[in-house]
Image (cartoon, grey):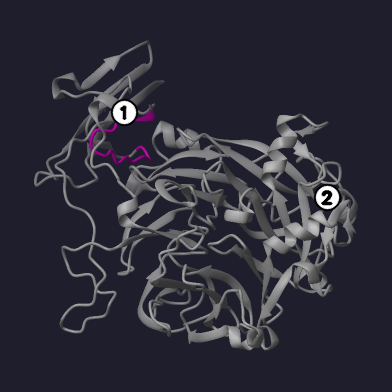
Amino acid sequence: MASLTYLFLLVLPLGLLGCGGSSASDDGAPASYVPPGEKDDYYLFYSGGHSGQVFVAGLPSLREIQEIPVFTPSPGHGYGFSKKSKKMMGEYRWGDVHHPGLSKTDGTYDGRWLFVNDNANNRVARISLRDFKTKQILGPIPNSMGNHGSSFVTPNTEYLLVATRFSVPLPKGTHAPVETYEENFNGIVSGVDIDPETGEMEVGWQVKTPPFNWDLGSTGKGPSDGWAFWTSYNTEMAHDSLEINASQRDRDYAAFVNWERAEEVVENNEGLNRRNGVPLIDPAEHEGVMYFVPVSKSPHGIDASPSGRWIAASGKLQPTTTVFDFKQFKTAIENEDFQGEFRGVPVVNYDAVVEGEVPVGQGPLHTQFDGEGNAYTSLFIESSVTKWKLPPWDKETTEDMSKAVTDKISVHYNIGHLVIPGSDTKEPYGNWLVAMNKLQKGRGLNVGPEKPETSQLIDISGEEMEMIEEDYTRPEPHFAQAVPADVINPIEVYKKENNDHPDARWDPENTGVERTGPDEVTVHMIAKRSQYNMNGVVPPGDTQTFTITADEAGVYPFYCTNFCSALHQEMQGYLEVKPR
């Protein structure tokens, strides 16, 4: 049975890509209007949810520019068909991308990489922003189930920090009755080490937690550099009917994790156990790694302000956003101002660390920052965004926290995440906010029962927020990141001198068929094969490998599926498979 390996090399003329600028035109066009031939000011990276992909749009136009295949095959890109991409994807053919995170240097975006998580299959991926291609998929991460609390990048891209949505018996693969959830199940917080030069990822350490459901997180900066923060729900440790049983307590817990201390524990090998080959830290046995802080019931987002001092957390079942003072948190630790402990982990006194509870409205989820001292919180139930002032507050505001709220705008409808460019850095670019709404409820043409989500562009450059633009997104954005276009410097073509593929061909005379053994046949060509359930798209200067099994005699046409010249239709031929 012959095996044919196809290598494709396309050399295409370079074209200009991109769309538009962001200033209002003289004829009164919206500020988001980007005229033909001009370019957007920002790249906007949407998570693709259960599509398994990342979608790239321009900001402020909101026009989609590109799809980046990550966890799901994409015939349009040849992704998941080449040997390299099939190997990288492993046994999984889909993923659930929730939270993209951009690489940073000194607390600001550096334009090198985009990291995303796979909530379904416990993986993370790294995308190079030099060519907008997925370069590595890591996972499944050991001992983890439901990699939701991810992907949170430390200020100098030392780590990608992730946490489990679901708890399981450890090590993963161990069986215990779910009725013994409280006794035998555990959650995990992981530090994924990132090589500063190559970006290669590997799991560096893990911290064992009680069987809470870890939700979302963020990384510190400035005074909170070296720390990470996660919210949890189900501190009741219920195992069924969580809609009811996981909402019994007045407060849940946020975890404040000292990742520098965790790193120290591993480096010093302080009596660690290993589970599935990974150093596993028990915070009850290693002081200073983790602390619990009470937070509003059923919290979702927790976000560190640009200064790194203020930590904003929102509970879905409480109409306020709680602001913690990290400086007060450090003081509370030094003074051991605890209200008890939970499984050996200190629980910090709530009153010692809370700066205030801002009455933002019903169903608060996530908070973003504009770098001008303002915060913006999404309200799922109200379908609104609330703008409020960060501390320090004057006496009048501390006595009446409603005075911290400065504006509110309606969105359409049921907003989940929102994003301001650079919000998770020390220097946000605070002129635009994108509201990512879960339901659009008839705002567009009817496309049947399955409705698209909407994104709405809000101008936040003035005192009052202003709705500017609306667009529809492919399923299903959870979070997004946005970065100024000039921070990223993509290549136009892969350089020949950097292509070390052993089967690369640069001269048409060197294409053709070689028999390298009794059955193995390598075909060097510049087109695609049909009828073999594969497709490839090869960018200029790149080389990819595709393998098929030619076990049926016959004559099979092949053709070019990706338009590249006026003679596109003529780019075809035949593959002959002779009978044995």
Does residue 533 belong to the magenta stretch?
Answer: yes
- In percent of the image, x 31 and y 56: which residue is there? 485
Q: Which residue is mark 1?
A: 6
From the image, state whether disc 1 or disc 2 is nearer to you.
2
User: What is the C-alpha distance between the residues marked 1 and 2?
Assistant: 48 Å
Identify which amino acid the numbered label 1 is placed on.
Tyr
Q: Which residue sits furthest top?
A: 517
Q: Position of residue 436 (x, y in %)?
A: 47, 71
Does residue 525 belong to the magenta stretch?
Answer: no
Circle on res. 365? none
Quadrant (top left/top right/bottom left/bottom right) for the N terminus: top left
| Range shown magenta | 532-548
Q: Position of residue 192 (x, y in %)?
A: 61, 41
Q: Which residue is mark 2?
A: 185
Q: Which residue sits furthest left?
A: 566
Quadrant (top left/top right/bottom left/bottom right) for the C terminus: top left
